[in-house]
Image (spheres, coloured by chain):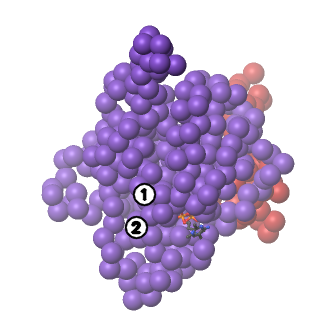
Chain colours: A red, B purple
Amino acid sequence: MARSDKVQIENPDWCKKCGICVSVCPTDALKLGDKGIEIYNLDSCISCEQCSLICPDFVLKVVVNYD
Amino acid sequence: MDIYKYLRKEKLPHIWCPGCGHGTILNSFVRAFDKSGLNQDKTVVISGIGCSGRATGYLNFDSLHTTHGRAIAFATGVKMANPELNVIVMTGDGDGAAIGGNHLIHAARRNIDLTVILFNNQIYGMTGGQFSPMTPEGANATTAPYGNIDRNFDLCQLTKAAGATFTARGATFNPRQLTNIIKKALLHKGFSFVESFTQCPVRYGKLNQTADPVDMLKLQKQKTADIKKWLQFSDEEKEIIYPLGVLNEEINPENEYTFRYQKIIEKTLEKGVL
Ligand SMILES: Cc1ncc(C[n+]2csc(CCOP(=O)(O)OP(=O)(O)O)c2C)c(N)n1
């Protein structure tokens, strides 16, 4: 079982659509949708945590994933 | 790491504007606190008035939301009453450097064991965008429609000169470094001062043609450099670029104010004065 940590949208209702997470993601894993942040490509997430560390609204979390 | 145990989840989402960097500082703070290993139940967070002052309302700690500019005065009282507590102040550039500037320098002079985190968005955000002592020369504010002519403080140099034994500067474009700095500040015995640049797209940005938070973060990055790199710069470059990182640290716990005060208590007890 390979372990790969991935970004998760923990608190979607708190997103204010500022777009900062999208701008810091090095692999285009996220995109802004109409209602807020969405996962665009989970496979590309390298769990660098840039998005969850900078998110001003505590929306994103990087969680342990087993696949 | 479970950062949510440090937050009052029922109070979120917070009132800060979309793209406001204050939430990033809060995010770095809770991570730094977790890494510091300090006891949440032995910690008090104290703020004054302003957007930055709202920070304590979102933190799951004992907290005080005090009057404008006076957070450090309240914090001094808390620390003197119970030196066992970790006392943290969250303040703004208006709250901490304008109306509360005197409390800042005198707490630094005493070297009392507080950690002060100053949210520097270079403007009075909450009241609509008046200039603060940290608004850059030439920048616009509602009270400086033709550009601000005042010079700024260098708050890290100011607090260091006043007696702070730990001074550091971070910025919201680099939350990893900010977290690291805050952790060190929390663990330092003595007055620790952390200035963090934070973007205010709605008040500062709109008045200064940078209303996009992502652009503001890029500007932050351009105007700052890590202290190691900064030290190699020419004098001209040093004038316009701010160093980031721990700028000064002096380790001498016996020089801390409540430690010295305890010595006085012991002396008076010995002499039978009390
Ligand atoms: C004694 C007093 N004077 C003035 C005010 C009005 N006031 C409220 S917040 C604020 C400025 C806050 O600016 P800053 O500390 O930079 O925080 P920000 O809102 O930018 O985070 C002022 C002047 C007040 N509440 N109390």
Q: Nearer the viewer, residue B269 or B87?
A: B269
Q: Is residue B45 visible?
A: yes
Outermost bottom residue:
B146
Q: Is residue A53 visible?
A: no
Q: Nearer the viewer, mark 1 or mark 2?
A: 1
Q: Which of the image's four quarters has the N terminus of chain B? A: top right
Image location of residue A11, percent across then percent down: 80, 50
The residue singled out by tag 2 in the image is: B133
Q: Secondary structure at mark 2?
A: loop
Q: Nearer the viewer, residue B213 or A5?
A: B213
Q: Is mark 2 within 8 Å of ligand 1?
A: no
**Callout 2 environment at 10 Å: few (<14), some (14 to 19), or many (20+)?**
many
Q: Nearer the viewer, residue A17 or B236?
A: B236
Contact (Cβ within 8 Å) of mark 1 with mark 2: yes
Image quarter for ligand 1 equals: bottom right
The residue singled out by tag 1 in the image is: B101
Q: Is residue B155 above or below residue B147?
A: above
Disc 2 chain ID: B
In the image, what residue occupies the spot 45% across and 70% down? B132
Find the distance from the CA under tag 1 to the CA under tag 2: 10 Å
In the rendered structure, which amino acid carries the disc numbered 2? Pro
Q: Is residue B236 above or below residue B62?
A: below
Q: Secondary structure at mark 1?
A: helix
From the viewer's perspective, is B159 left or right of B198?
A: left
Image location of residue B224, percent across then percent down: 35, 56
From the viewer's perspective, is B96 left or right of B24?
A: left
In the rendered structure, which amino acid carries the disc numbered 1? Gly
Disc 1 chain ID: B
Q: Earlier in the sequence, mark 1 or mark 2?
A: 1
In the image, what residue occupies the spot 37% across and 61% down? B222
**Callout 1 environment at 10 Å: few (<14), some (14 to 19), or many (20+)?**
some
Image location of residue B131, percent across then percent down: 46, 75
